[in-house]
Image (cartoon, helix red, strand yellow):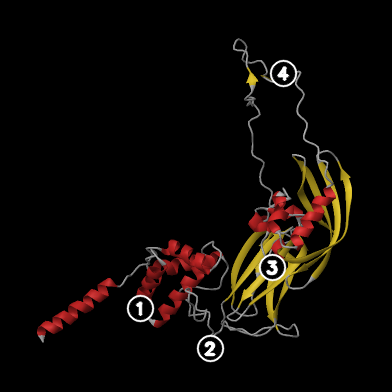
Amino acid sequence: MKKFSLLLIFSLLLFTACKKDHVDATTTQTLQSSINDMASGLTTIKQIKFNEALYILKTFGVEAEGDVNELKALGQLINGKKVPEILSMADQVAQQNGIEWASTAPPSLGEMNIFGDETAKESDPNDVRASSLSILTQLSGDTGNGPTAMQIVPRLVDNSGNPIAFTGAALETTLEVFSNGVKLSTAKNLMQDNNFRGFNLKFSSLLASKIVDNKIDITVSVKTTAKTFKMSKIGLDVNPSALKVPEVPKTDSTVIVQDPNAVIDPSNPTTPPTTGTDPGTVPSQPKQSTADPKNTVSKFLNNVSSQNLKAAFDSSSNPSWGSYESFSNPTSGFGAIKNVSVKNISINGTSTNSSSVNATYDVTDKNGRTTSLKATFGLKNVNGEWKISSYKINP
């Protein structure tokens, strides 16, 4: 009997010794196992705050798209960390993002699970029942030179458009900012009730070179247990004088830039360089395009309408559209378009190297909403082929 007791005590000690007191992010399984080990040694209240801290870090402390990638990024962030360190990190992230949360405060985010349990509980504060989402916007921060920011406040509303009442939730709320179809920024916060203060978008965080016609588009999404609500506002004015303008790099005016093809006289190295090109050589002229630039615009719109987005992207050379992934994005890019109905295409003017084409057409998105647009396409001659190099929506 004594031997059995000693064996039992030894087994319990061995089991206790195997439990981890720090995060092991080697795999998703070891991440979950180590977090469970760490939580099992805490009081019930501490366990809840620990789970809230992990949720704060996963949602706001890492830059990744999708739950799986967020979880991997979280593992890298907290690998080797112990409970007090994780709580401290979450406090910093919450403060940086303006979230009303603290590791020393009572539980406030409901039942958090970073490993993706989305099933509604009997009492689930995130299972908020609403009809739709509305967005209120207001310019702010005017110091005499125009507004410097925009306050963006989302509200969950009922069928009549009235804000609904709820408390104690932790609804992941995301703001995306675009201009001319290109995403400029993303911000996240937690909506805990319908008195949510929203987002304060500072114009100084937006690059002036990325803003087309001094207008931005915004999309806000709010994730409840059962549904993600989404709402957009198009063509919001920004104050151009408050936008971010990168400083022009300073150059030393005394430095002489040498032409790498210059021929230098060894006996007189201070002589201004002359290139090795034969003076009688005539610079080669760009290949002239014989195609009609209207055809390029027409094919582009037809390809967008048929969702042949790769062909549409290949007919352009427009830096503001970014990569193909940005161009074809199903939420913020041309991937959100279901159909294009062209009414008229006409040429503004054409030279050897550039052309301007006007187009009037109706766009129907995947939600069935139709918008009439008047756009000007700028085109440039690339090796004898017209490529769309700029795009502007006209009033």
| Coordinates of residue 151 in the picture (x, y in percent) | 70, 67
Q: Amino acid at mark 2?
A: Ser
Q: How many neighbours does mark 1 have within 10 angstroms: few (below 14), some (14-19), or many (20 or more)?
A: some
Q: Secondary structure at mark 1?
A: helix
Q: CA distance from mark 1 to mark 4?
A: 81 Å
170 or 354, which is in the foreground? 354
Q: Nearer the viewer, residue 308 or 50?
A: 308
Is 155 on the left or on the right of 355, as rendered? Answer: left
Q: Which mark is residue 123?
A: 2
Q: Are marks 2 and 4 in contact (CB under 8 Å)?
A: no
Q: Is residue 207 left or right of residue 384?
A: left
Tell me, yes or no, if residue 144 can be seen here.
no
Q: Which mark is residue 219?
A: 3
Residue under circle 4? 278
Image quadrant where one finds the N terminus: bottom left
In the picture of the structure, the residue carrying the numbered disc 1 is: 40
- Residue under the image location 75 percent in, 53 percent down: 241
Please state which amino acid type lies under the numbered disc 4.
Asp
| 371 shown above or below 244 | below
Q: Secondary structure at mark 4?
A: loop
Q: Indicate the amino acid at tag 1.
A: Ser
Q: Earlier in the sequence, mark 2 or mark 3?
A: 2
Q: Secondary structure at mark 2?
A: loop
Mark 4 crowdedness (10 Å alpha carbons): few <14, some 14-19, many ≥20: few
Mark 1 vs mark 4: which is more N-terminal?
1
The answer to whether any part of residue 204 appears in the image is: yes
